[in-house]
Amino acid sequence: MARPRNQEARKRELVSVTSRLLIERGQAGARLVDIAEAASLTPAAVSYYYPDLADLYSDTYETATEQYLTRRRQQVSEIAPAVERLVECIALGVPHAGTSSRAATVLLMELSALAIRRERIVASGLEFEAEQLRLFGEILDQGVAEGTMRLPYGALETARAILAVEDGIAIPVVAGRLPSDEALRVTLSVATSLTGADLLAARG
């Protein structure tokens, strides 16, 4: 790893290395010695920038969630009708093999396991969930305004239900127990029952 001129640049590189190791090997393969080797540094050099490895994991989680949210919101914003926006938003949350969505899902799952012990990751996780609920809520409110969706529950409750299905179904997909296409079909079916919009037909 080339030596950046400033500490923030070095930290960004270490976050990038840590992300890659977590995706490829999981937590067991992203220890201090593993990160140091992958970054062409000594463990002491990594510890200079991150005396507590938990802070490196926390920065990695914050970066991962920010990138995930930015990518999702940008891609959804390019679609006008609410029904199509919701279909795309849900599709982006399914971890299809060989895509950035799967890599991001694996990374977030690995880091989320630390959330019960790390205050910073807990805080980032809460913000991550709130932003996703906000995005889903905006789409649902738009659908109601357009007359293409009918919500038996409020927008927030509906958004939370869809997100819960998305989060729960990602685990068997990543574990190889459920095909991603089937996971998408199931999630769209549940969302259809919650919105009154035929999301499967909109998916085509």
Image: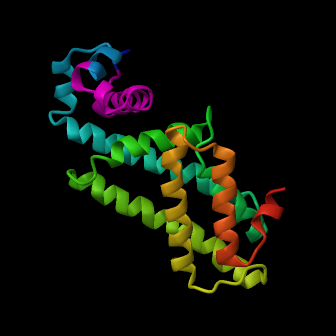
The type of colouring in the image is rainbow
| Residue sitting at x 39%, y 62% | 127
Can the viewer see residue 91?
Answer: no
The quarter in which the C terminus is drawn is bottom right
Residue range (magenta) = 4-33
Q: Is residue 28 magenta?
A: yes
| Figure check: 2 above or below 9 | above
- The answer to whether residue 13 is above or below residue 169 is above
Image side of residue 137 versus residue 18, left or right? right
Q: Position of residue 25 (x, y in %)?
A: 39, 26
Where in the figure is residue 164, as x and y percent of width and height?
A: 49, 64
- The residue drawn where x is 75% and y is 69% is 83
Q: In the rendered image, which quarter is residue 16 located in?
A: top left
Q: Nearer the viewer, residue 171 or 59?
A: 171
Q: Is residue 167 left or right of residue 17?
A: right
**How many numbered dots are placed on residues in this image?**
0
Residue 31 visible? The answer is yes
Rendered location of residue 123, percent (x, y): 30, 59
Left or right of 175 in this view: 184 = right
> Is residue 17 depicted above or below 123 in this figure?
above
